[in-house]
Amino acid sequence: MNNPYSEIFKTKGTKHFSCAGFIARMPLSMMAIGLITMLSQLYDSYWIAGSIAALFTFTMAFAAPQLSRLIDRVGQRKVVIPAVLFSAISALALLLLSHLQAPLWSLYVLAMCAGIMPSVPALVRARWSAIQSDQGLLNTAYSFESVLDEITFVIGPPLAIALSSLLFPQAGPLLAVILFVIGSIWLVSQKDTEPKIEQSENQTRTSALANSTVKLLSLVLLALGVIVGAIDVLSIAFAQQQGMPIAASLVLSMYALGSCIAGFGFGAVKWRVSMPVLLVRFAIFTLIASVLLLSVNHVYGLAVVMFISGLAFAPTMIIAMGLVEQSVPKRLLTEALTWLITGLGVGIAGGTALTGWVVEHFTVDLGFGVAVVAAATVVLLARYQKHDDKRRATQVVSD
C-alpha cells in the first residue's frame, strides 16, 4: 500500500510551494502572541496587549476574504506582493513606535494596517486544488497542510515568546515579519503552480459565504478559535502567576504538538464513518479536554492537558475543510476556505481580547471558563451541522 503523503509530492513543484507556504504562514502563530508578549512588557497591561493583538487578528480575518476574491480575478502575484509589502511596513512601524513609547492610538492604527494580509493557507490549498485531480490525494494534501499549520504553532509561539523575553520585546514579532516577507515572495514567484484565472461573468457576483455549510463551519471554527485565543493569553498569565513565565512556551508547544500528531494520523486513516459524525465526536472530545483545564493547578499539569486538548484541533480543521470542499463549486473553493480561516481568526482575536479582559479584571482561573463555553458551542454547532447534512441528504433522495 502506497504512502498517501509520498504520493502527493510526486507532482513537480509541490514541495517548493508547500515549503514556501510553511515559512510565509509563520506570522499566524507568532505575530499575535509576539505582540501580547511585547506589549505586556512595555505597557504592563494584558488588556492593552490583548486588544491590540486582537485588532491585528480581526483585521487579518476580515481582509483575507476580500483579497482572496481579488486574487481569483487577477491572480496571486498581482495581489499578494503589494499586500505583503504594505502589511510588513506597517508592522515594522508598529514595532518602532512601541519602542519609542508612542501614543496608544498609533499602535492600534498600525496594528490594523499590518493585518491587511492575504491568507497564506488558502493560497497554498488553492494550488493543491489546481494541480491535484484525485479527490483522495487532495484530502491527504489538505491534511498535510493542516499538519504544517500546527507545526507553525509548535515552533512559532515559543520562539516568539523566547525572543521577546530573552532578547528585546520586539524580537518575536520582528522575526515573524521577516519570515512572512521571505515566504510570501518565494511562494508567488512559483508561476508554474499558480492557479489559472477562470473568466466568468457570474464569478465576481457570487460569494462562497452564501453556502449554508460554509456559514455553519465558519462559526464552528470561530468557536474553536476562541479556545486558541484564550489559550494564548492563559498560557502566559498562568505561567507568570506560577512564577515560571518562560514555561508558557512549553504549554503552547504541547497544545500544538498534540494537534500536529493527531492531524498527521487523521490524514493517513480511511475513516468508515461520515465526516459530520466525526465532527461531532471531535467536538465532544474538545469539550471534555476543555473541562479538564478547570482542574489544573500547576504549569506542567496545564501542559499535559493542553496536549490532550490539541489532539482534537487539527482533525476538526481537516474535517471542516473536507466538508466545505464537497459542498462548493471549484471556482469558489479558495474563497470558501478563506472564510473558514477567517472564522478561526475572528475567534482567536475574540478569545484573546475577552480572555485578556477577564484575566485583567478577575482571575486566571475564570479565564479558563472562556475556553469551556467556546468548546460547548463547538459541540452544539457540530451537532447542528450533522443534522443539516442528514436533512439535505434525505431531501436529495426524496427528490
Image: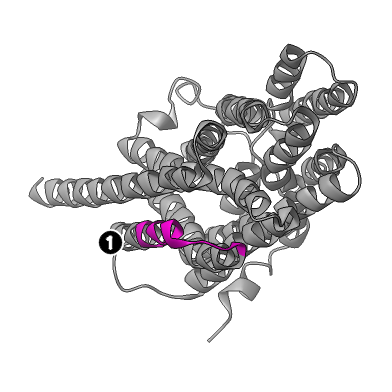
Q: Position of residue 364 (x, y in %)?
A: 53, 45
Examine the image and state in which quarter residue 9 appears: bottom right
Q: Give the colour scheme shown.
A: one colour
Q: Is residue 383 left or right of residue 397?
A: right
Q: Is residue 145 above or below residue 367?
A: below
Which of the pair 4/365 is nearer the observer?
Answer: 365
Q: Is residue 10 left or right of residue 230?
A: right
* In magenta stretch: residue 182: no
Point 78% across, 36% down: residue: 41
> What is the chief secondary structure element of the magenta stretch?
helix
Q: Position of residue 299 (x, y in %)?
A: 61, 62
Q: Position of residue 3 (x, y in %)?
A: 58, 80
Q: Is residue 141 above or below residue 57?
A: below
Point 68% across, 38% down: residue: 32
Q: Position of residue 355 (x, y in %)?
A: 52, 37
Q: Residue furthest left?
A: 398
Q: Is residue 278 above or below residue 86?
A: below
Res 388 visible? yes
Q: Is residue 339 left or right of residue 279?
A: right
List the residue tagged with mark 1.
277
Res 328 visible? no
User: Which element is circle 1 on?
Assistant: helix
- The magenta stretch spans which residues? 287-299
Q: Residues within 10 Å of mark 1 (few under 14, many from 20)?
A: some
Point 82% across, 29% down: residue: 88
